[in-house]
Amino acid sequence: MSKKILIADDERTTLEILKSTLTQTNYLVDTANSALEALKKLESNSYNLLITDVKMPRMSGLELLEKVKQEYPQMDVIVMTAYGVIDDAVAAMKKGAIDYILKPFSTEGILLVIQRALEQQDLVLENRYLKEEIKTQYSYETIVGSSKKMQEIYELMERVADTDSTVLIRGETGTGKELVARRLHYISDRKDKIFVEVDCVALTETLLESELFGHEKGAFTGAIKRKIGKFELAHNGTIFLDEIGDISPTMQVKLLRVLQERKFERVGGNEPVRVNVRVVAATNKDLEKAVAEGKFREDLYYRLNVIPIYLPPLRERVEDIPLLANHFLNVWNRKVKKSIKRISPKAMNALLNYPWPGNIRELENVIQRAVIMEKGEVITRVDLPVGKKSPDSEGSFTSMEMTGDLSFPAAKEQFEKEYLIALLKKSRGSIRAAAEYSLLDSKSIYLKMRRYGLKKEDFR
Ligand SMILES: Nc1ncnc2c1ncn2[C@@H]1O[C@H](COP(=O)(O)OP(=O)(O)OP(=O)(O)O)[C@@H](O)[C@H]1O
Ligand SMILES: [Mg+2]
């Protein structure tokens, strides 16, 4: 795309020469006879570069530079000044000009300066892209899982990746929503463009609005510069709106408008900004319930829910647990420079029987801890919260098999041991704290520990 340049000079001949030279070099050129005219044109057009003469009646090029830098901090300005008035060039650079041109100038000379300025601009932009990319790169990881449910998800992702339809990713915490959002971007034809992530709960309403849509200078206290929002930054790429279920009613209205019209205004601005972005949103909230309760706009819900992707909780695809556990074993071996070979069948069995309320994130944490703690070559022990209730098996201690096969004294003994382990985990091996939590006295805790062969060192 051709770059657009505005030239301000009170001498008509200079304007004409410059205009024809630059137009021949494929730049789009606009001209202004005075600083004031330049300011007017800047208000209603967008340019990549401003070139201004210093000596102009009424308002000088240096004053213009100052005003432009205040109002459009992203705008690059080149200053033209006569030979012998090098002081003006120095002053201009101090005020933030990107470069200067000495008059009279040669065609090659001026083209070089312009080209250099524009290249530098691209670098700055690219840098911003790169910063975002670095954040995303570490997460460009494999999605592990071969269960039928996961295969269906891979297929769905392939089918919708290249469409521009809005995708809504649903699933409990830790099921991989963010992972899927990134993957969708990297298998789409927008993959060479930017992936921008916004965590919608992390910010207050005002901050979220300016984060999403940007703001003009002076839009609110603290808005000392114009700022580009994430929607603008994501132009041609993908924007990932995480935790969308938590946004306020006002933000819901604003978001609805962007989704409908693909345009918005920066906070404190009134010029519409148009963008081409693929929207991917995620939530672990029950949006249908929120809609029924009037907490989430129905129209927004339909706009978002064009293509829903449901990520099943880990307990509904138990067959993926060994695969995932071994994957995280490799990952953490590498990260902490260990070479643990495998997970013992007993430990794996424990993993298979745990309900995983924190899903894959929790599984990764458990394996990470086991890798760090393990001194041998095989993981024989995994630390699982004992007695945690699974959401759909209320009241049962999941690590215990309540089959009725045991005699009462044996069942009681098993319960006592499991309970004690959980208690000591919670108290990190402190008998005094365990006594406080359990309302037992320290002595009986101590005796029971001896009876079941438990050592407090093991819980630190
Ligand atoms: N299928 C998978 N294969 C490998 N790693 C996975 C998989 N799913 C999730 N993970 C890993 O588990 C962790 C949690 O995933 P992610 O952050 O995508 O979850 P989430 O659904 O966004 O959770 P939350 O709702 O809490 O934000 C991440 O470290 C991610 O890399
Ligand atoms: Mg997430």
Image: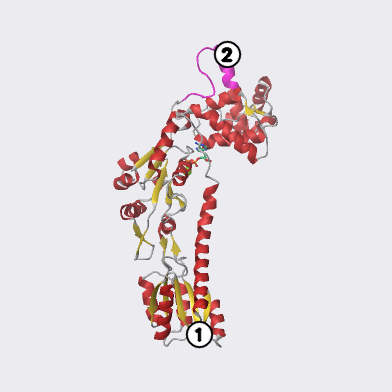
Identity of the residue furthest to the left in this view? 299
Residue 372 image position (x, y, % from top left): 65, 36
Picture mark count: 2
Q: Quadrant of the image for the N terminus? A: bottom left
For marks 2 and 1, give the one nearer the viewer: 1
Residue placed under numbered mark 1 in the picture: 104
The answer to whether residue 375 is visible is: yes
Reply yes or no: does residue 399 show up in magenta. yes
Give the number of the disc on residue 218. Answer: none
Q: Earlier in the sequence, mark 2 or mark 1?
A: 1
User: Gap between marks 2 and 1, in whole Å?
Assistant: 103 Å
Residue 45 image position (x, y, % from top left): 37, 70
Reply yes or no: does residue 119 show up in magenta. no
- In this picture the colour scheme is secondary structure
Give the number of the disc on residue 409. Answer: 2
Q: Are marks 2 and 1 in contact (CB under 8 Å)?
A: no
Q: Residues within 10 Å of mark 2 (few under 14, many from 20)?
A: few
Residue nearest the observer in this picture, 459 or 450: 459
